[in-house]
Amino acid sequence: MSITNTINSIAIGLALGCSAAFAWSACPQCGVVQGVNITETKGDSSGVTGAVAGGLLGGVLGNQVGKGGTRDLATVAGAVGGAYLGNRVEKKMDVKTVYEMSVKMEDGSIRKVVSEKAPVFRAGDNVKLVNDQWQPN
């Protein structure tokens, strides 16, 4: 191989290498999913509605037990227990699951996407942002 052919081969290799590097950084909307974190958030519920409903139901059920003083005690115990359980049930029903997907963009920045829908992508997936929607890349 002559020196001219060697220089030409090096020049072509550099040109291809530069174009490959340019093509890699030419997609500012492309990235790789780093991971998905799943968290639960508490809603705005105070639990009062559940406590009132549970207390009423517990009091009615407690009133069906025993006679005289025993019935009064069962009514109070049913109301208190029902209020406690109603409060807990309402607060538990108001929990929301939130998914946070981290995407490392080609420019090195990290984008976080928060949604109540489970993402279809997993860590390591190549993605592209098109019209505010993540798509496979």
Image: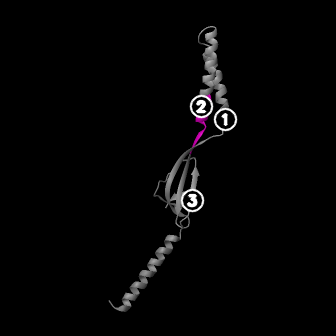
On whether residue 95 falls in the magenta region, the answer is yes
Residue 11 higher or lower than 97, as above or below = below
The residue located at (60%, 58%) in the rendering is 132
Q: Is residue 95 left or right of residue 6?
A: right
The residue located at (53%, 59%) in the rendering is 103
C-alpha distance separating marks 2 and 1: 10 Å
Q: What x and y, as percent, mark residue 14?
A: 44, 81
Residue 65 higher or lower than 114, as above or below = above
The residue located at (65%, 21%) in the rendering is 56
Q: Most extreme residue toward the top, as rendered? A: 68
Q: Amino acid at mark 1?
A: Ser
Quarter of the rendering occupied by the N terminus: bottom left
Q: Which residues are magenta?
A: 86-97
* Main SS category, magenta section: helix
- The residue identified by callout 3 is 111
Q: Residues within 10 Å of mark 1 (few under 14, many from 20)?
A: few
Q: What x and y, as percent, mark residue 22?
A: 50, 74
C-alpha distance separating marks 3 and 2: 36 Å
